[in-house]
Image (cartoon, helix red, strand yellow):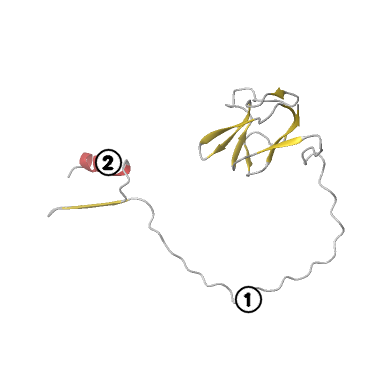
Amino acid sequence: MDIKDIKTLVKVITDSDITEFEFETDEERIMIKRGKDTEIVQVAAPAAYPQPMPLPAAPAAAPAAAADAPVANDQYDTISSPIVGTFYAAPSPESAPYVKVGDVVEAGQTLCIVEAMKLMNEIEAEFKCKIIEIVKANAQPVEFGDALFIVEKL
């Protein structure tokens, strides 16, 4: 078997879901394996966990800076991330953001994109509102339930 045939064979295997291929004749033997072998590792748990040492009394921590916390007020609502992913304020790096602080948006209007596993998910306003604060920075990771926008219902 020449190198051209071997390259063709490798391409066919990588384009399929075959994980192992073996070919043998009197003169040659070819074996191709894809993926990693599964390895099972067993670790014994410790017999007992040590008791934590009490910490010396410390003065009360100062409250976090107001600039770091989103605006908290009864008159405002929060639009949160429905999924884990990456927050994008615009459809592309060259484009203007979907919304800015002070914009009034209609129900169904796109506010941002949360990218999860290479899938771009448009986050839309569920009601007419005014953007009070954009909580996340562009390309910042977000968790499920993280605040994305502080808005005022109109």
Q: Locate residue 64, reporting x and y percent.
A: 81, 46
Q: Amino acid at mark 1?
A: Ala
Circle 2 is placed at which residue position? 12
- Of all residues shown, which one is farthest toward the bottom? 47
Q: Residues within 10 Å of mark 1 (few under 14, many from 20)?
A: few
Examine the rendered structure and indicate whether residue 113 appears above or below residue 117: above
State how far apart marks 2 and 1 are (Cα): 53 Å
> Of residues 40 and 70, which is closer to you in this image?
70
Mark number for residue 98?
none
Residue 48: mark: 1
**Which image quadrant: the N terminus?**
top left
Question: Which badge, 2 or 1, comes first in the chain's sequence?
Answer: 2
How many tags in the picture? 2
Q: Is residue 102 above or below residue 50?
A: above
Q: In this rendering, would 43 be left or right of 5? A: right
19 on left or right of 99: left
Question: What residue sits 50% from the left and 37% below the top?
Answer: 118
**Residue ranking furthest to the left:** 26
Point out residue 105 in the picture as x, y percentages from the top left corner. 69, 24
- Residue at screen point 77% across, 39% down: 70
Q: Is residue 110 above or below residue 54?
A: above
- Label 2 residue SS: helix
Give how far across and how far down residue 146 sits, in percent: 67, 42
Quadrant (top left, top right, bottom left, bottom right) of the C terminus: top right
- Tag 2: residue type? Val
Q: Quadrant of residue 106?
A: top right
